[in-house]
Amino acid sequence: MGSLRRGQPASATLDRSLADLYRAGLDVDWEAVLGAPPADVPLPAYPWQRRRHWLGEATQRADLGTAVPQAERAATIALFVRRRIADALGLDDVEQVPEDRPLADFALDSLVIVELKGRAESELGVTVPLQALLRVMHGGTALDLAAMIAKES
């Protein structure tokens, strides 16, 4: 079986030849080809452990009822919403998400919306009804969403 092709890298053609031999029934010594397998990584056995396994700082849960005065809640929540949207869109600056721009303009997918709901509930200590969130996401702004979340808290 040929293992070199003109104009193609040797590693790619050797890999292709090895794959062809394997498909033809050759018992390949994968450890000799790939090297020793990496060490196992311990993972949580129970999926609902509620322990985070992400690198970086752990977020502190804020209780809006005691941490933020009523008059400042909407502005604090609006900034929170804008930061999360900027993060989801890969934007460096929260100012790229104006508080008065319709959220529908950002074309956020459902996964980002549900993640925003979960983060608001866990980090702000509020309950965000999904139907109300979807209604605001469809036609409202970050300020509208903040007002809805503040009203629910």
Image (cartoon, rainbow, N blue to C red):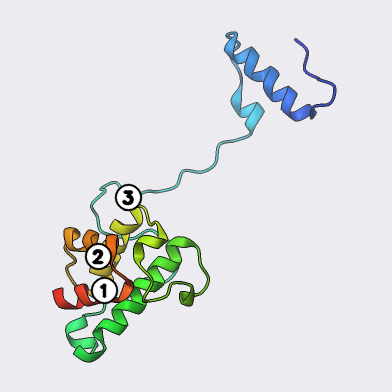
Q: Position of residue 12 (x, y in %)?
A: 72, 28
Closer mark to the observer between disc 3 and disc 2: 2
What amino acid is labelled 1 in the image? Answer: Asp
**In the figure, residue 146 lies in which quadrant?**
bottom left
Location of mark 1 (residue): 144
Whether pointer 2 and pointer 1 mark residues with C-beta atoms closer than 8 Å, the reply is yes
Q: Residue at x 60, y 15 (%)?
A: 22
State the SS at label 1. helix
- Taking the spot 28% from the left edge, 72% from the top edge, the residue there is 123
Which of the image's four quarters has the N terminus? top right
Quick check: can you spot residue 49? yes
In front: label 3 or label 1: 1
Tell me the crowding category of disc 2: few under 14, some 14 to 19, or many 20 or more residues within 10 angstroms, Cα based: many
Q: Earlier in the sequence, mark 2 or mark 1?
A: 2
Distance of label 2 from label 1 (alpha carbons): 7 Å
Which of the two residues, 61 or 53, is positioned nearer the viewer here? 61
- Quadrant occupied by the C terminus: bottom left
Q: Is residue 130 above or below residue 76?
A: above
- Does residue 69 appear in this view? no
**Relative depth, front residue between 98 and 12:** 98
> Eyeballing the image, is 35 above or below 2?
below
Q: Residues within 10 Å of mark 3 (few under 14, many from 20)?
A: few
Secondary element at tag 2: helix
Task: Answer with mark 3 or mark 2, whichever residue precedes in sequence.
Answer: 3
Q: Position of residue 92 (x, y in %)?
A: 53, 71
Tell me which label, 3 or 1, sits earlier in the chain. Answer: 3
Q: Is residue 4 left or right of residue 70?
A: right
**Image quarter of residue 118:** bottom left
Q: Which residue is mark 3?
A: 44
Residue position for label 2:
136
